[in-house]
Image (cartoon, grey):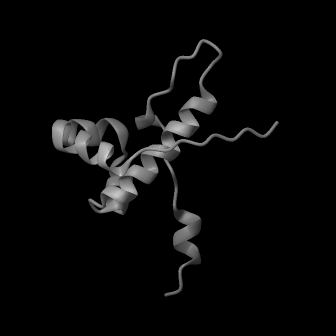
Amino acid sequence: MLRTGVDIIEISRVAAAINRYGDHFLARVYTPTELDQCNGRVESLAARFCAKEAAAKRLAPASGALASTGKISKSSAKREAARPP
């Protein structure tokens, strides 16, 4: 069975979380590789946050407990391989 999920967030909410909680928020939500790939771009961080939230919600057990978004990672290997040199 194929399952999908969608999540949206205002970019300003992610920016506010970063401003308020700093490195603690970033380390809890993103992997070091994701932080490196996003290079501080709040728009990219917000997009990854949405992808992680959608995946966490979709993968959550029936009890409603969400997986930690820090344990969900998005790989961009295919996208990077498709980029022209």
Closer to the camera in the image, 32 or 19: 19
Tell me the residue at 39%/58% (across/down). Answer: 44
Looking at the rendered structure, the number of numbered marks drawn on it comes to 0
As drawn, the residue found furthest toward the bottom would be 85
62 lies left or right of 75: right
Query: In the figure, residue 63 lies in which quadrant?
Result: top right
As drawn, the residue found furthest toward the top would be 63
69 lies left or right of 77: left
Tell me the residue at 51%/51% (across/down). Answer: 74
Image quarter where the N terminus lies is: top right
Indicate the position of residue 59 as horizontal and vertical percent values.
62, 30
Tell me the residue at 32%/35% (across/down). Answer: 28
Indicate the position of residue 68 as horizontal and vertical percent values.
44, 29
Tell me the residue at 28%/43% (across/down). Answer: 26
Query: In the figure, residue 18 lies in which quadrant?
Result: top left
54 lies left or right of 10: right
As drawn, the residue found furthest toward the right would be 1
Indicate the position of residue 56 as horizontal and vertical percent values.
54, 32
34 lies left or right of 64: left
Q: Is residue 85 above or below residue 10?
A: below
Indicate the position of residue 65 as horizontal and vertical percent values.
52, 17
